[in-house]
Image (cartoon, rainbow, N blue to C red):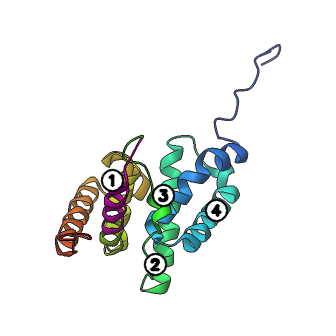
Amino acid sequence: MPGDDREPLPDPRPSWEQVAEEYGPRIYQMALRLSGNPDEAADLAQDVFVRVYRNLHRYEPGTFDGWLYRITKNLFLDRVRKRQRVRLQSLGEEEWEQPASADPGPADVMERRALETRLQTALDGLGPDFRLAVVLCDVEGLSYEEISEATGWPMGTVRSRIHRGRRQMRETLARLPLEGAGA
């Protein structure tokens, strides 16, 4: 329109620098929880960011987190399918360390490490889809709706996989010996 002095609307997509800075640690942590191995997590996170870099111009504004989680999920499941068997290792203690309080005592630290080891063992025992559902819900804190959007699974599938994944984890935890019990 002649004489239209309106400035064009800014691009709603984040810049590559914003994506790397804001989402880098989150994607790596999710990859670490899914793979159970720091080296595999680094490879998966790198693959995610290569895919994002190549396709950022195609991103249609909406839920950016969901778009990233969907890419991460797809690349993780592709790796699982290629191997037909996922090699899992428990996370080292330092990856799970978060003080239970501002001033934990030695017994608190040991109890927390034992619990974290048991939880990671139970998580490692889940199939890839169940692990993804539990990690997105219980570790990443996504709602069922966000998980459905990120994974492309119907809502019933999301609910079922979270429920079944949690149940399998409870059963595994019930069978695992309590470290330090009776000591």
Residue ID for mark 3: 70
Camera-side mark, 1 or 3: 1
Q: Amino acid at mark 3?
A: Arg
| Magenta-highlighted residues | 103-118
Q: Earlier in the sequence, mark 2 or mark 4?
A: 4
State the CA–CA distance, disc 3 to disc 2.
15 Å
Residues tagged 2 and 1 counted as in contact (Cβ below 8 A): no
Q: Residue 6: x and y, percent?
A: 75, 17
Q: Amino acid at mark 1?
A: Asp
Q: Residue 128: x and y, percent?
A: 37, 72
Q: Earlier in the sequence, mark 4 or mark 1?
A: 4
State the CA–CA distance, disc 2 to disc 4.
18 Å
State the CA–CA distance, disc 4 to disc 1.
42 Å
Residue ID for mark 2: 80
Question: Is residue 153 among what the camera can see?
Answer: no
Q: Mark 2: which secondary structure?
A: helix
